[in-house]
């Protein structure tokens, strides 16, 4: 990679951030398309986020990705926030437009792209079950509702949190039926027999643990499984689902797809679908 006095700087803000695959795939894209830019990780602890955002302006950083734990708190520090990101309540991409910092959320678009490409899931009129009720769930739910699914059931260990999320979203998507339940509820168990797609947005499986509250044997054979967690050795959910003959995909595709959408927001260059995923897989 050759840099010059005109090189633009991009990066990722997070705590931790050393594990991120984003520098690898973004720098590969810059190099492949001959863009004079570099992408670097910025380790920013929560108390330093305001100073870091001020630094983006002072140093004229062209754009950044935003990861845990800053996706929600950064909203108040930006000049503008895209309506979809505002509804999701989280920003994962910032564009510096001549000193104006604009926040976007490409997690939602990356999620939809991935389930369509890797699971060939056609959203319109279908029923979806989402595990978890945090920020990742909200992004997935907004994306699915915007793509005209029929029903979204949100299941969480604490049902009240799922209910709050449902109450927030159903106002914006009156054409979609929303339901809230916990993992022991009859609604949750009954939904396993009917839903077309199950999405894990929880952190369960990140360290190799099983999702004990999800009885895969009760899921209809045509159901699709998407695990937002990515592990090179496959998460337990992916392993168990494949052993039962269920069609599934993990979070690598979503990581790559949201990165491709961020790249487009920064550069105006639309990468071929799967460009970043193919690069990560080849490594």
Image (cartoon, rainbow, N blue to C red):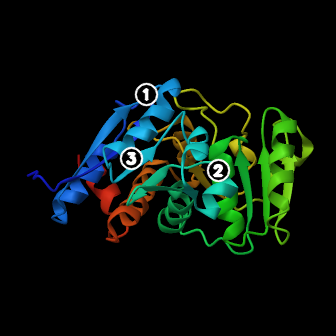
Can residue 231 be seen in the rendering of this structure?
no
Of pointers 3 and 2, the one earlier in the residue sequence: 3
Q: Residue at the location (54% across, 58% down)? A: 111
Helix, strand or loop under label 2: strand
Q: Select label 2 or label 1 by which is in front.
A: 1
At a point 36% along the width and 60% down the height, the residue shown is 263
Q: Which residue is mark 1?
A: 16
Q: Which mark is residue 29?
A: none
Q: Is residue 59 left or right of residue 131?
A: left
Q: Residues within 10 Å of mark 2 (few under 14, many from 20)?
A: many
Of the residues under marks 2 and 1, which one precedes in the sequence?
1
Q: Is residue 179 visible?
A: yes
Q: CA distance from mark 3 to mark 2?
A: 37 Å
Residue located at (17% from left, 62% from top): 32
Query: What is the distance, in whole Å, between disc 2 and disc 1 at their CAs?
Result: 25 Å
Instruction: Please state the horizontal and vertical placement of residue 162, each as a whole percent of the image.
Output: 81, 43
Q: Quadrant of residue 264?
A: bottom left
In the image as oriented, which residue stretches furthest toward the right?
A: 186
| Drawn side of residue 6 relative to residue 172, left or right | left
Q: Nearer the viewer, residue 254 or 45?
A: 45
Mark sitting earlier along the chain (1/3): 1
Between 182 and 147, the one lying in front of the other is: 147
- In the drawing, what numbered circle is on residue 199? 2
Real-space CA distance between mark 1 and mark 3, rounded to the nearest whole angstrom = 22 Å
Q: Secondary structure at mark 1?
A: loop
- Disc number placed over residue 57 in the picture, else none: 3
On the image, the x and y values in percent for residue 109 come to 54, 63
Q: Position of residue 206 (x, y in %)?
A: 52, 31
Mark 3 nearby-residue class (10 Å; few <14, some 14–19, many ≥20): some
């Amino acid at each position: 990679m050759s840099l010059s006095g005109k090189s633009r700087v991009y990066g990722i803000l997070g705590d931790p951030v050393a594990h991120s695959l984003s520098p690898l795939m973004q720098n590969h894209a810059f190099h492949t398309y001959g863009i004079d830019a570099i992408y670097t990780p910025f380790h920013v602890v929560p108390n330093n986020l305001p100073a870091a955002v001020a630094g983006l302006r002072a140093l004229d950083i062209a754009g950044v990705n935003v990861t845990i734990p800053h996706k929600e708190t950064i909203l108040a520090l930006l000049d503008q926030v895209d309506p979809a990101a505002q509804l999701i309540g989280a920003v994962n991409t910032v564009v510096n437009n001549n000193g104006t910092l604009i926040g976007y959320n490409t997690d939602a678009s990356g999620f939809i792209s991935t389930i369509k490409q890797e699971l060939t899931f056609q959203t319109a009129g279908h029923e979806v079950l989402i595990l978890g009720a945090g920020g990742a769930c909200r992004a997935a739910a907004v994306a699915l509702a915007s793509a005209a699914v029929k029903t979204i059931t949100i299941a969480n260990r604490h049902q009240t949190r799922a209910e709050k999320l449902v109450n927030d979203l159903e106002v914006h998507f009156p054409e979609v039926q929303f339901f809230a339940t916990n993992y022991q509820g009859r609604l949750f168990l009954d939904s396993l027999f009917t839903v077309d797609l199950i999405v894990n947005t929880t952190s369960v499986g990140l360290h190799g643990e099983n999702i004990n509250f999800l009885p895969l044997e009760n899921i209809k054979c045509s159901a699709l499984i998407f695990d937002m967690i990515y592990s090179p050795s496959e998460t337990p959910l992916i392993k168990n689902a494949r052993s039962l003959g269920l069609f599934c995909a993990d979070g690598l595709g979503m990581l790559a797809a949201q990165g491709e959408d961020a790249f487009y927001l920064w550069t105006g260059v639309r990468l071929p679908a799967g460009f970043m995923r193919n690069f990560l897989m080849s490594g």
